[in-house]
Image (cartoon, rainbow, N blue to C red):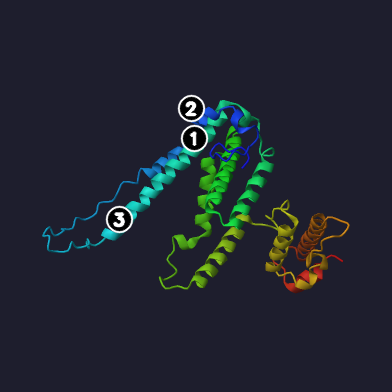
Amino acid sequence: MTRSHASGNGRDFGPGRDSVPGRELAEGSSAPARSAGTRAASGELDAISSTAGEPSVPATAVPTDPGTTAAVPTAAGTTDAVHAAGATADVARMTEALGEAVDVMDRLWNFGGWEVTQTHDSLRPYLLEETYELLDAVQAQDAETIKEELGDLLLQVLFHSRIAEAAGEFTVADVAAALVAKLVNRSPHLTEADFGADAAVEDKIAAQERAWEERKSAEKARRSCLDGIAMAQPALALAEKVRSRSAKAGLPDSLVPDGLRAVRLGGPDSAEELLRKRTLLFAAAIREAEDAAERARGTRSPLSAADWIEFWPR
């Protein structure tokens, strides 16, 4: 990572690790008063962990005669109860660990050192670097490094949330709540029993993807098929996303320019920048066609292949 208070990898995040102001706070000194966001997050986690008591398991008589074989408990519900107890214990452990991570970030912030001088913008290089380091770990199939890099990304989530909390915008609890609301809303299969136990995996995936896109569209009410695409992502990923999104919107393949069909290296210009420029021009043409169709028809509605060709800028 770049200076991680949670790992001892020796890499630096901002100031040198050994000279980080407030490092002693992360290592056990008394903590300042916790912020509202930390209390809210901890409160939600405590509410979850408060339900982690072990469910009662029906007692089953076990023979004491040395000549007999002890029977495995078979009371109805015993197996489910044991599984439930293990699940709630896991939730309790996760609750404690995540709560501690939020608390350490809050204590570092309250120390008033390097952390409070950072902004969303100043942390961008670190966020990008951590993402690439995680991708490297995934490529290497190194579980320990993946774990470490995921922790570094978690630090970024906590850090950005703390910055937003200080600005009165949102807290880490709000971030978690928004994620839960999104996942539940876009995943009706979590609450609706539409599939039997023998349903094929392919059928489940198709239903998930369909529900996800339908509910996402309803949430966003986007005007363009390209809305929501991160235009600052690497050029190749951007080109793939724009092509994929436009194809789903019915854009004929014949309208895709040759410059987006292959990437050539070794020319006088940067392949990255050339691909980005071509992708942005293609995206602009897509939006122009959508706008032209709206002006002609008086409404914003999906375009057919013929519509795309008719309204495509010349």
Q: Is residue 283 above or below residue 40?
A: below
**Which residue corresponds to mark 2?**
31
Which quarter of the figure has residue 254? bottom right
Mark 2 falls on what kind of element? Answer: loop
Mark 1 residue type: Asp
The amino acid type found where label 3 is placed reads Val
Q: Of the numbered discs in the image, which one, if any, rests on residue 87?
A: none
Provide residue 202's location: percent of width, then percent of height. Answer: 52, 72
Mark 2–mark 1 CB contact (< 8 Å): yes
- The secondary structure type at the circle numbered 3 is helix
In x, y percent, where is residue 172? Answer: 54, 40
N-terminal of the two: label 3 or label 2?
A: 2
Which amino acid, mark 2?
Ala
Q: Quadrant of the C terminus?
A: bottom right
Classify 293 as above or below 221: below
Q: Which residue is mark 3?
A: 82
Q: Is residue 2 above or below residue 141?
A: above
Say which residue appears at 42% left-offset and 73% top-offset.
198
Give the spatial CA distance, label 2 vs label 1.
9 Å
Q: Please give left or right for residue 22 compared with residue 255 in the image.
A: left
Q: Quadrant of the N terminus?
A: top right
Q: Which quadrant holds residue 266?
A: bottom right
Residue at 76% in and 71% down: 307
Other-residue count near label 1 (Cα within 10 Å), few / some / many at <14 / 14–19 / ≥20: many
Q: In the displayed structure, does residue 90 sit left or right of residue 299?
A: left
Q: Residue at x 79, y 56 (%)?
A: 272
Q: Earlier in the sequence, mark 1 or mark 3?
A: 3
Give the spatial CA distance, label 3 vs label 2: 38 Å
